[in-house]
Image: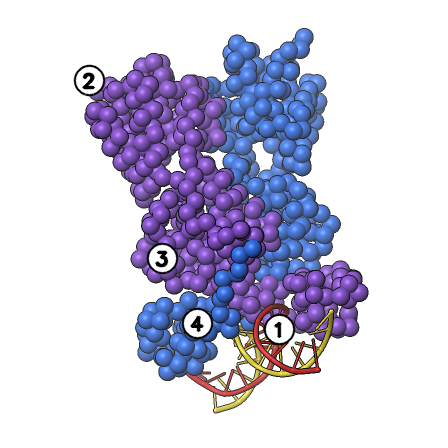
Chain colours: A blue, B purple, C yellow, D red
Amino acid sequence: MNEQKPRKRRGAGRVTLNTVARQAGVSAITVSRYFNQPEQVSPERRERIAQVVAQLGYVPNLVAGGLASARGKIVAMVTPNISGPIFANTLQGFSDTLSRHGYQLLLASSYFSIEQEESAVRAFLGWSPAALVLTSRFHSPGTEKMIAEADIPIVETWDYVPERAPLQVGFSHYEVGVTAARYLHGKGYRRIAFVQNSAVGDLSALERRDGFTATLSELGVHPWVFVPDADRAPFEAGKQAMEALMGQAITPDAIFFANDNLAAGGLLAGQRAGLSIPQDCAVLGFGDYPFAHMLLPSLSTLQPPALEIGVLAATRVLQSLGVLATDEEVERLNLLHCQLIEREST
Amino acid sequence: MNEQKPRKRRGAGRVTLNTVARQAGVSAITVSRYFNQPEQVSPERRERIAQVVAQLGYVPNLVAGGLASARGKIVAMVTPNISGPIFANTLQGFSDTLSRHGYQLLLASSYFSIEQEESAVRAFLGWSPAALVLTSRFHSPGTEKMIAEADIPIVETWDYVPERAPLQVGFSHYEVGVTAARYLHGKGYRRIAFVQNSAVGDLSALERRDGFTATLSELGVHPWVFVPDADRAPFEAGKQAMEALMGQAITPDAIFFANDNLAAGGLLAGQRAGLSIPQDCAVLGFGDYPFAHMLLPSLSTLQPPALEIGVLAATRVLQSLGVLATDEEVERLNLLHCQLIEREST
DNA sequence: TTGTAAGCGTTATCAC
DNA sequence: GTGATAACGCTTACAA
């Protein structure tokens, strides 16, 4: 067991606001104002303080500031995962927009588990963040309680549910399903299947399915739904789906996959089996993952406004905090839309 | 201009350690111990406190704790980007390992700019994080100064430079170049080119180039280096490179691209021009991006230990903090290796 | 095992 | 425009 490196506690020797104040011959609060409301400090003192700050290499202690003001310049975000192709762009847009305004990002991932989300939210709240951003609308009762009581702006992203209390920045997954169904039906396909995501807990994907199947039924087409084994990686699940579907007596002429990873697996499995796509079977994905345009044939898909969600969520947060100006009240409902990207696979 | 939502300052009504202490009939410090050294609190009080905490929904204020102890349970990380395929896995591994031990991740991206990195580091230091993790060894003088003076564990990832002071968790990019050169030469290729990254500031990619060209020279092969236009997206830059290289009088029989995005662009441009790969020209990438195995032909590439870097970096951080046990001193030098993934494109 | 007292470094409040 | 003073909610140090 190694010993924790001994660090002097009571910040002995640390450069504080007081050190700067003494050196500059002003009071601590003036230095504080120099950082927070510089216009309230006379130009001469401003210059003097700037000098001392540079000379001493003073870095404001934001922890102390956060405690004193009960409002740290931190925004917390919980996302299902970081490394996936979906949420990464939202994260990037969110983080960049925030940091441009001096806010820091506290991040955790939930892996689509509402329990993990709850524990992340609980830990975050201890840092009294300026705002909290969640992904999707599905939370544990504990999380619901915390966000109801938290006295900070809460934003839910990716989903869009007007009747919920938090700010909404997202799109309707159901609508995505509707769009996909109309599109495939409009292209003349009539034996149409949906392939579900193998990741348990991705409830939004089920809404896409519901919109898809309901619309097909309305159009008089009986929709197939294929559910891959729960433990498979998406790419493998896509393969499994394609092999299973094309091995039947009656085969589909178009398949809508719950996401592009599944679709890519399906695409390759189809080609390996000698199918020509889209002639024998069209393939439609969801997500417009980075590789979608690199496949052969390139993958038709629905592109979610990922980056836009991140930027807009950050903007609404900053507006709620009064950092960014708004003409009127902060827009609570922000409905964005997916874009159908037609490529070669349909 | 909208007004900042008025929030009570002096946490009026907020549930604090003292509220809990009063309710439980103990002193504040006992409640504090209940959270930090539960074994020092008698079972009866422990149970009583647990009850009250649950009943009041008390959430410890980590900001106050951080200020008092000068050691917040936050670890800060600066990465070139979040959404790219490269660093995302490192980030994920890092974040997950940390959060398993109750530490939170403070994150910012630098976009390969040492100025942005410096400003992120400065902001982070204000939160007095328990540790700081950077990507690569290239920093501004200001950053160097801060990390030299900061009294916390510093880790540099992805690069591996034993002579530097911070903990190193990474691999040798130069060695990657050497491996690639030997591999292509060993396969019998003799007219070999390197395609540089279009992203300015990606200095590690230049080290791969150096290892590659130096090794080829040693092997008696004259290495080509193609530099795409600086403003192009990687995929487009790869296309440009392939078209330019194959348009010459003497064409290469193998190309090593600085990363898989470039390689994918090259691959598709080659196929579109009617080349068969690898017969007419072999293509080797770097990164093993998620799509590498989905391409047709699938892309041979060098796979960096991305996730492993993240997990190991977090482990070393936790060991340095005494959270995780170590037999001896914390390993300062952690050299990992890339793996050559041979697929169809070579 | 438990408690008391004294800060941690900043900002809100109010007075000048 | 500037300053003195008292918090913010917790943990360290020391005592019992």
User: Disc 2 vs disc 1: Cβ atoms closer than 8 Å?
Assistant: no
Q: Which residue is mark 3?
A: B143
Q: Is residue A106 above or below residue B293?
A: below
Viewer-proximal residue, B192 or A188?
B192
Query: Residue drawn at (62%, 73%), measured in percent from left and top?
Result: B10
Mark 4 and mark 2: Cα distance apart in space: 66 Å
Residue A288 position, x and y percent, is 51, 31
Q: Which residue is mark 1?
A: B10
Q: Which image quadrant is residue B217 in?
A: top left
Helix, strand or loop at disc 1? loop
Q: Do pointers 4 and 2 mark residues of a single chain?
A: no
Helix, strand or loop at disc 3? helix
Q: Which residue is mark 4?
A: A14
Query: Residue drawn at (41%, 41%), measured in percent from left and top?
Result: B335
Amino acid type of the residue that numbered disc 3 sits on in the rendered structure: Thr
Residues packed near mark 3 inside 10 Å, few (<14), some (14 to 19) or many (20 plus)? some
Residue B127 position, x and y percent, is 49, 62
- Mark 2 or mark 3, earlier in chain: 3
Q: Number of marks in the image?
A: 4
Q: Do pointers 2 and 3 mark residues of a single chain?
A: yes
Amino acid type of the residue that numbered disc 1 sits on in the rendered structure: Arg
Viewer-proximal residue, A77 or A254?
A77
Residue A34 position, x and y percent, is 41, 73
Residue located farthest toward the top when viewing the structure as drawn: A249
Q: Of discs 2 and 1, which sits in the foreground?
A: 2
Q: What chain letter is assigned to the residue under label 2?
A: B
Amino acid type of the residue that numbered disc 4 sits on in the rendered structure: Arg
Mark 1 and mark 3: Cα distance apart in space: 36 Å
Mark 2 and mark 3: Cα distance apart in space: 48 Å
